[in-house]
Amino acid sequence: VKRKERSVEEYVAGILNNERTILAQAITLIESNAAKHTEKAQRILHELLPYVGRSIRIGITGVPGAGKSTFIEAFGQFLCDKGHRVAVLAVDPSSSVTGGSILGDKTRMENLARNPRAFIRPSPSGGTLGGVHRKTRETILLCEAAGYDIILVETVGVGQSEVAVRGMVDFFLLLALTGAGDELQGMKKGMMELVDAIVINKADGDNKKKAELAKEEYNQILHYLRHATKGWETKAYTCSSLYGEGIEQIWEVIERFVQTTKQSGVFEERRREQMKDWLHAMIKDYLHIRFFQHPAVQQQLPTIERDVMEGKQPVTMAAQQLIRLYEQT
Amino acid sequence: VKRKERSVEEYVAGILNNERTILAQAITLIESNAAKHTEKAQRILHELLPYVGRSIRIGITGVPGAGKSTFIEAFGQFLCDKGHRVAVLAVDPSSSVTGGSILGDKTRMENLARNPRAFIRPSPSGGTLGGVHRKTRETILLCEAAGYDIILVETVGVGQSEVAVRGMVDFFLLLALTGAGDELQGMKKGMMELVDAIVINKADGDNKKKAELAKEEYNQILHYLRHATKGWETKAYTCSSLYGEGIEQIWEVIERFVQTTKQSGVFEERRREQMKDWLHAMIKDYLHIRFFQHPAVQQQLPTIERDVMEGKQPVTMAAQQLIRLYEQT
């Protein structure tokens, strides 16, 4: 069934009125790479700009198996019960690594998905270059315009996606498991310096004692690290998503974080810097894409690269030659 | 006194003959940003390509006060005494941070500077963007062509310069002090995962016991981290640059590293990857420079940036507008 194309005005009105179908369609439009969609999407975003920015943006990461879905389900329900409206977005670092969209499965958060105060949107696995991340940022804005006041951005702890997510959220939370030592060896280095809190999940039953120990271990290691946010000390906490224990405490931590950083101006300053960084990152991406998609560059690059790697051509000369190809043809 | 301009052939012959004055002048030429110098420098490099690559490139970093000059002086003398020829290059991360060229002072390594088997070249503080790092890589090649078989690249442990140095050396060494805990808090995170060895300097006199303790501390922490080089376990060592103790051991470690990685192919593979990364980094730099130096972009950027930061214009639209300005005018 081919659906009737909506006008920019219809999209804008529908989103501001929080019509979920229209919001979902607008996100699809944003995610599209077709030129005509891009233009329309940008016009919609432009109209919505006065209505964005009034949420708390929370990033959630953790290695596969750390219980991200269970945590988000419990945390999201808790927030909805408190009267918030919660949007859950997933940054899927492309399916090529994992052999399938890990986060594409909506049924993971069954209860939250049925909650009328929640909106869950899995991200498409759209390659790396600017694709997924750029679209997630714009999706955040659409959800804010639709009235969601808590945005949860979920990402799997692999590769570069955490750095990207740190650049689009106010508060960043790392879900961890017991056995910090073992886990840390597998954890991407630098991870702990990106986050504002570490939450040891599954602190229930036989596991409770181990979770407390892991918390101590993490707190000890955090001593050696820089904090992600000026004026905020990153600490470790425990919770049980299964029994809802500790969930309230985590929300209190986030509320305190928001209060502290808003008072100090760090909150607003980070948001402004994120916008600027976003612009510069996007310019870099565009330039990069335009360069490497250039036919003459594509034709010559493999040969020139090989010559450079084999020491037959100086790098500067090779780079200049390629740039000349790009600019002159 | 205006000196006579040398021809490409004179430069090449002089460098291959290890005439230090000509080598020094060639490096100055390489470092120059004037277009006519760039072209000449590239022609010289091109001629020298068959003679480069046959050295061991060693990066040395550490926080200010870790005793880098004293270590390099002792280590360099040791290597010269063993019959090696040693070039010392400094990557100065620009004087704007430190209020003066920290490394510009040749007299720091008085004895080594007088050794006929050694060549010391402080780096100019030439801004960040591609400047210093690009030139250091090319300076390494010139020194190799002049017959230096050990290249020491010194950098101060601040900011991004370590990542750049890691990308141009075979072996990377971190000089540290006792009191690992305290120091680690100040140390740039990720640092320990970039290096192939940590050397606790000043392990002499009253300090010897503390140095041994620090070594243990570092080894413990290294357990949690990824190693910088495939098939090589990064470990901590102690030495006293003042009394020359431990210097020989460090050289043995490096020799073992070179042997191991050459056998496994990791050495050659890293060199090839470094060349490719260098080419891509340079393309990125060039594109960036050409974009931001474009008159129309320069004129419009501040306004567009402000609009984006204040939420008046969507980022994608702003980026597209700037790229259009760049390409069409």
Image (cartoon, coloured by chain):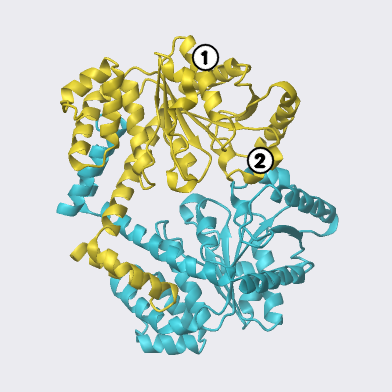
Chain colours: A yellow, B cyan
Determine the image quadrant of residue A269: top left
Residue at left offset 46%, top offset 88%? B14
Q: Could you tell me if residue A31 is visible in this image?
A: yes
**How many numbered circles does the render carry?**
2
Quadrant containing the N terminus of chain B is bottom left
Q: Residues within 10 Å of mark 2 (few under 14, many from 20)?
A: some
| Left or right placement of residue B181 versus residue B61 in this view | right
Per the image, the residue denoted by label 1 is A78
| Left or right placement of residue A34 versus residue B128 in this view | left
- Amino acid residing under circle 2: Glu
Return the x and y of residue A204 as percentages of the image width and height. Answer: 69, 21
Determine the image quadrant of residue B285: bottom left
SS assignment at label 1 = helix
| Left or right placement of residue A80 versus residue B252 in this view | left
Return the x and y of residue A61 as percentages of the image width and height. Answer: 53, 34
- Residue B87 drawn above or below residue A116: below
Return the x and y of residue B124 as percentages of the image width and height. Answer: 46, 64
Determine the image quadrant of residue B90: bottom right
SS assignment at label 2 = helix
Q: Which mark is residue A183?
A: 2
Between B201 and B262, the residue placed more toward the observer is B262
Return the x and y of residue A125 as percentages of the image width and height. Answer: 39, 41
| Left or right placement of residue B247 versus residue A134 in this view | right
